[in-house]
Amino acid sequence: MNPVVTDLTEAFRAIARERMEGLPVVNEALSVEAVGFTAWDGHLLGVLIAPWFMNLILLPGKSDDWHRLEAGSKQAWALPSGEYEFTVGRVDGVGIYQSCALFSSVRDFPDQGTARQVAQAVMAEIFKRETEGSRPLQGLTQDEVTEPVSRRELFRRTLLRGRGRGE
C-alpha cells in the first residue's frame, strides 16, 4: 500500500478511537479501510470506509501544491465518469486531502465485506466514461439504503441508482 494511503488510514483509525467511539452515527460493524486507491492524473484516488462515512478521497501527487487550499472549500474534478465536487480537508499525519461524500451515513451496512464490495463497485464506476444522461455517483442518502437489506440488494441499489446526487 502507498505510504500516503497508509498514513490516511492510520489517521482516521486514530479519529475513530479518540473522537468517534460510542457516538450514535458510528456503525460498530465497520472499520477504517482504504479501498482501490490508484494513481489518477498525477494524484491518488480511492474510497475510504470509516464507521461513520464512505467517501471518495483524492490525495495530492508529488507535484501538487495544495497548501493554499482552505479546509472546507470546494473543488470540482472531472473524472472519467463525470464531474464530482470535492471538499478540502486536513488531518494530522496526512495533511491536505479532498473528499467527495458517497454515503454520509453507513449505519445500514451490515458488515465490512458489504461496505468493501460497494467501495470496489464505486471505483469501477468512477473510471467508466460518462455517457449521455448519466450523472456522477455521489451523495447517497440514508433513505436509499434501508434496513433490512441484503448484500446483493445494497450493491444493486448503489450501482443502479442512476448515478445521481441523492435526488
Image: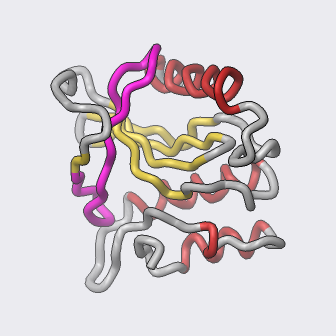
| Coordinates of residue 80 in the picture (x, y in percent) | 29, 60
Q: Residue furthest bottom?
A: 133
100 falls in the magenta region: no
Position of the N terminus, as image quadrant, is top right
Residue at 26% x, 62% y: name it: 83
Residue at 69% x, 70% y: name it: 154
> Is residue 95 positioned above or below 155 on the image?
above
Total numbered badges shown on the rendered structure: 0
Colouring? secondary structure
Q: Residue furthest top?
A: 93
> Is residue 100 positioned above or below 2 on the image?
below
Residue at 77% x, 66% y: name it: 151
Q: Main secondary structure of the magenta part?
A: strand
51 left or right of 93 in image = right
95 falls in the magenta region: yes
- Rendered image quadrant of residue 28: top right
Position of the C terminus, as image quadrant, is bottom left
| Coordinates of residue 7 in the picture (x, y in percent) | 51, 19
Residue at 63% x, 36% y: name it: 33
| Coordinates of residue 44 in the picture (x, y in percent) | 36, 35
167 left or right of 48 in image = left
> Is residue 125 positioned above or below 50 on the image?
below
- Rendered image quadrant of residue 130: bottom left
Which residues, given as a range, are shown in magenta? 76-97
| Coordinates of residue 127 in the picture (x, y in percent) | 38, 58
